[in-house]
Amino acid sequence: MTVLDHLLSIFHEAGVYNRHDLAKPSVILWTDGQRSWEKVAPLIAQSRGGFFQLQAGEVDDFKGPSTWIRYQLGKWTGDEVPVVYLPGIHRHQFRGAAGFPEEARHLYALQFKGQFCSQLNGKDWTPMALLSSESGGLGLKVGKDAATQEALAEQLTVILQTPCAELRSKHLEASDFHELAAGDPVRLLLDWMGDPEGAKASWPSGQWSALVGYSKKELGFDPEKDGLIIGAEKLTSAEGKWAKVWKRFEEAAVSFPGVRKALDLVQPTDLFTSSNPRIPATNRRMEDDLRKGLLKLSELNASASRDSLEKLVVEHVDRASSVWAKLEEAPLASSCRHLGGMLEAMKSGMAGADYQVLGASYLSHGWKVDAAARRAWAAARTSEDSAALTVALRAVYLPWLEELAERIQSVAASYPVSGPPQAPRHKPEVGMVVLFVDGFRADLAMELAVELGGAGYQVDTREAWAALPTVTATAKPAWEPLADLLDGQQPSEGYEPTVKATGKLCRTNEFRKLTSEAGWSWFEGAQIGDSSGSGWTEVGAFDRYGHDQGAKLAWRIREEMAAIRQRVDELFAAGWKKIRIVTDHGWLWMPGGLPKVDLPTHLTNSKWGRCARPDPQASQSLLQVPWFWGNEYPVVLCPGIGVFKNGVEYTHGGLTLQEALTLSIDVAKSGQTVTSAVTITETKWLGLKLRVEVSESDPDLRADIRAKAADAGSSVFKDDPSQREKTPDSEGRLTLFVEDDSQIGQAAILVILRDGQVIAKRNITIGED
């Protein structure tokens, strides 16, 4: 990873958000009052889509006036949140419209729809902070003297393209930064190949002659007389010492976009060079060959398709780790890594003919088939690549789903959960919160369990079976003791049970009221609840994305998984002892649409994609199961993985392992104990002094002001630890003093900690009540 890669990751992190906490930011504002980054903005723009720089006057490439930027943002459709770079503008200038720079006035309101890209203390990122900060930066040892800062500014382009590992072994000073430029001829050569005229013109005297001398002596290449195309040919040959140059480019190709363009000058001239994997044309040809091979799978039966797909994977999977994959120019090769994993998981088979054995087999390895299939499809973003992968999945993955569905439906009479007596029980416990995730399919739950375990949490998983039909209205309230308050005496078209006490259908408001009656305090996703009791909260939008976007749900999985992980961390930081992650149902997913099954409308009272309520006066031969909430009311299920509607790529409501088998995950923090609740009863600003009153005078309590509640590194007192060690007096009072007046008006969080754990917090604005 290069320094530039780390800077790009900071942009990405600025765009990460919790859907239940706030709206997705439409823009990232990058203020740079000192214009520290202005000269490297072109390099950043080449390395990241959606990068716009404020510039008065004419539009120039990615630069333009504020009105032009607003226009570009309005039509932006990329996956990354766009970045607007504002040289010469400080973040504090956004505090009020009065006095805001005229040249940027059309961008002032963007702060309410976006995020600022700044340090945790609210200050602008500077090159020095990027290298030295331990809170979001690289944490390197860098001299603070004027000469070092001058050298850092002068050699910033070179530094951004340097692998971080090369900078970690020493205390960096001015001479180190100059040596990066003058003492790294391989980098100089790559810089020249990326922009021959521009690089030569920007170098200090002597640097060009040094490069020419090195190239002629060590590489047998004269940049002045041989020119760029010869250099590109030698680079792709990687012969002799050119192998070192290629390796350097391969390791940090994103940092050398100009070199990538130069490689297009190289064209295969014979059979030998046409197979050279370092030539872009070779990779493009192989992607085309792979695409054609995937499309041909539509002509084969299931068995032959598996064999043919396996051969394609073996032939192309090595390119998944190539430089072209890193540059996102080999999406189909990247998909091969997942297609290979799907085929490998299929080979393990799905043992058994009953729910217990089939469920165990799925949670052992079957889930990997589903996970690999959606990852393979998600790797491609163009319509032609998506079409090829759709054909491949329909040829291999669809028959696997069909066979498994038919097997589990053949034993429907022994389904493990037929009514409330078999429902799972969630007993309220002090310090435990239930985190409900709508449509959290078992393969996703398995991935999260592995990730949480790797992060040091204690994780315990339990198999669970959804209530039938597997729709939210029926399955979400199907747990004890909530189920004791419901019945199915009044069947509805939406499959909602009825509240016994009121006769109302159990919809959102009734569900929340009954959850509280059952012992769980319900709170919104933006809140943290009261960890001294038991709580219920919700996160995730898998089901909504699936219904709205069909197969493209696969593109949204990563951001939704990140939102769940963020919520888990927030809840533990807020003092909860245990988190139980539960769901209502899974789903079927198939690019190109699930098979259509005809069911005449006159045979049913209501019809969903995978289930229907039969008309008592009509006869039909489809599978029927009892409704969970009223066994006397049957539900017609669509056979196999079929659906009663055309063109449906995502659905649920039927009986398959993917829809019915779910996972309950209990997560605990190692060594965490339940403590008495502490509340912040009063806050009062007197200038930059914050007077705080809490409900306890415990000497083990500590107070801090942070940008992020769970991140100690975001403390505004980072340079003055004595301020965040404040403890309440005998009356529960304490005072915190913020020395930096530039932070006035910034949003922050007051946190109260015990043993390093956040047990209470309050949103504040520094200097303002």
Image (cartoon, rainbow, N blue to C red):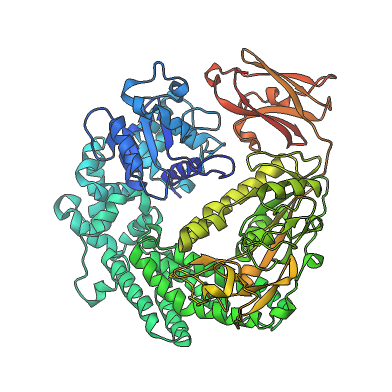
Q: Is residue 313 left or right of residue 707?
A: left
Q: Is residue 755 left or right of residue 113?
A: right
**Spot occupied by residue 716 in the image (x, y as percentages of width and height):** 60, 26
**Spot occupied by residue 607 in the image (x, y as percentages of width and height):** 56, 68
Q: Taking 272 as reference, is 453 above or below it? A: above
Q: Residue at x 81, y 35 (%)?
A: 677
Examine the rendering and report whether any part of residue 542 can be seen: yes
Q: Residue furthest left?
A: 225
Task: Write down the quadrant of residue 612 in the picture.
Answer: bottom right
Q: Residue at x 60, y 28 (%)?
A: 748
Q: Residue at x 21, y 46 (%)?
A: 196
**Spot occupied by residue 333 in the image (x, y as percentages of width and height):** 40, 68
Q: Nearer the viewer, residue 46 or 188?
A: 46
Q: Nearer the viewer, residue 720 or 379?
A: 379
Q: Residue furthest front?
A: 617
Task: Write down the quadrant of residue 7 in the picture.
Answer: top left
Q: Taking 337 as reference, is 245 above or below it? A: above
Q: Taking 562 as reference, is 632 above or below it? A: below
**Spot occupied by residue 614 in the image (x, y as percentages of width and height):** 62, 73
